[in-house]
Image: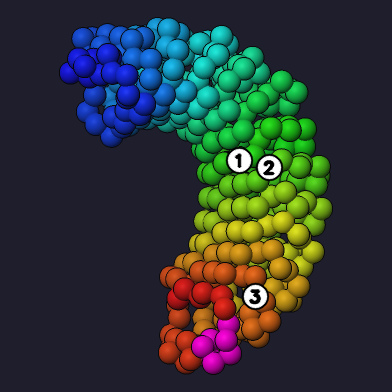
Amino acid sequence: RVHGGLAQSHALQTLLLHHNRITDERDWSAACRDLLTSCQTLAHLDLSSNKIGDVALDFIVTGLMMSQSLRRIGLADNKFSPKAFKKLATYLHANRGIQSLAIGENKATADVGEDIGRGVELSQALVELDIGGLGLGRQGLGTLFAALQSKSSRLVTLKLDGASLDAKGAEEIAAVLEHNASLTSLSLRDSKLGGRLNFAGALAANRTLVSLDVGANGLKSSDVQSIADGLTRNSSLKVLTMDSNAYGNHGLEILSQALQTNRGLVVANLDRSKVGDKGLVLLPAALSSNTFLRVLSLRENAISVKGIERVLDALRSNTSLRQLRLDGNPLKETAGLAERILAEGIVCSIFV
């Protein structure tokens, strides 16, 4: 059914088949290969979150090798075995067309990680890679990180969620940030970085990273300190996501100090990180001097109306912050708060 008229289409550019019940049925697999081979306009194919296995993957890789038009493919969250997966990783070595590849949430081994690393280094086209939850292991990640430090790396976006980085891995990803000149977006969610983060020097040296996500890592105040130290010498990072951690009041105090001198950050997400009223002590000073931050999110913490009132004076003179997200905090008697916001002409939208 997929192959039918679609293979002969001169207009089809995007085909989204994610979250279906596609299996490893051989006829369908062959049709998918023929579609990739015959349809010369198809640029984006998403087969993520199905039940595709080794048989289909073999056909898909064959189709990828022959496709002249495909630029984006999603294969995340399927049923590939490590052995079959290796063929896809090897394909990257000769890749000249695929720019975006999502293969996370599958089963892989260290040697697959080595192939992916070499593919990142050798590919002339790949700029977006999602390998979150792939389970590459220490050796596989080491090869990938070495490739990312190469001057030939062109990768712009890397999603590496669930990487379970040990101390050595944390050092290597910091080295990547220090030496890589192509990455603009890096996601390291749920990678067990708590107590291991040392990004001060890396962020100070980096001039290309725009978005960094270190949410759900069990980050401590010492980890926040390393990021804050880097932010005082970095103006390229625009979006910082640090939600679902446990750094608490001290963590926000540290970040508030960095915001007094940082001249780049636009969005900061500190949701669900055990921040209470005491953590807001230094925030007014930060908001009084910072004219770059546009969105500050502190949702689902432990902040009360009394804590928010500390910040309102700073918001009266701050005209750059556009959103302060406080939804999900234990706020009571917000009517008086709303009246004060209106009376004092605060331009920032405060969500409670």
Q: Quadrant of the N terminus?
A: top left
- Which label belongs to residue 185? 1
State the separation of the CA atoms marked 1 and 2.
6 Å
Left/right placement of residue 200 relative to residue 173 reads: right
The mark nearer the N terminus, 1 or 2, is: 1
The mark nearer the N terminus, 1 or 3, is: 1
The mark nearer the N terminus, 3 or 2, is: 2
Query: Which residue is at a point 36% across and 26% down the rendered structure image?
Result: 13
Left/right placement of residue 45 relative to residue 100 reads: left
Q: Label 2 sits on what residue type? A: Leu
Query: Which residue is at a point 73% across and 26% down the rendered structure image?
Result: 149
Q: Label 1 sits on what residue type? A: Ser
Callout 3: few (<14), some (14-19), or many (20+) C-alpha neighbours within 10 Å? some
| Residue 350 % position (x, y) | 51, 75
Is 342 contained in the magenta span? Answer: yes
What residue is shown with label 2? 209
| Residue 240 % position (x, y) | 62, 53
Does residue 49 sit above or below 39 in this rendering? below
Colour scheme in the image? rainbow
Is disc 3 placed on a helix, strand or loop? loop
* In contact (CB < 8 Å): disc 1 and disc 2: yes
Q: Quadrant of residue 116?
A: top right
What residue is shown with label 3? 319
Q: Nearer the viewer, residue 121 or 77?
A: 121
State the separation of the CA atoms marked 3 and 2.
26 Å
- Which label belongs to residue 195? none
Q: Quadrant of the C terminus?
A: bottom left
Q: Which residues are magenta?
A: 340-346
Is disc 1 placed on a helix, strand or loop? strand
Q: Label 3 sits on what residue type? A: Thr
Callout 1: few (<14), some (14-19), or many (20+) C-alpha neighbours within 10 Å? some
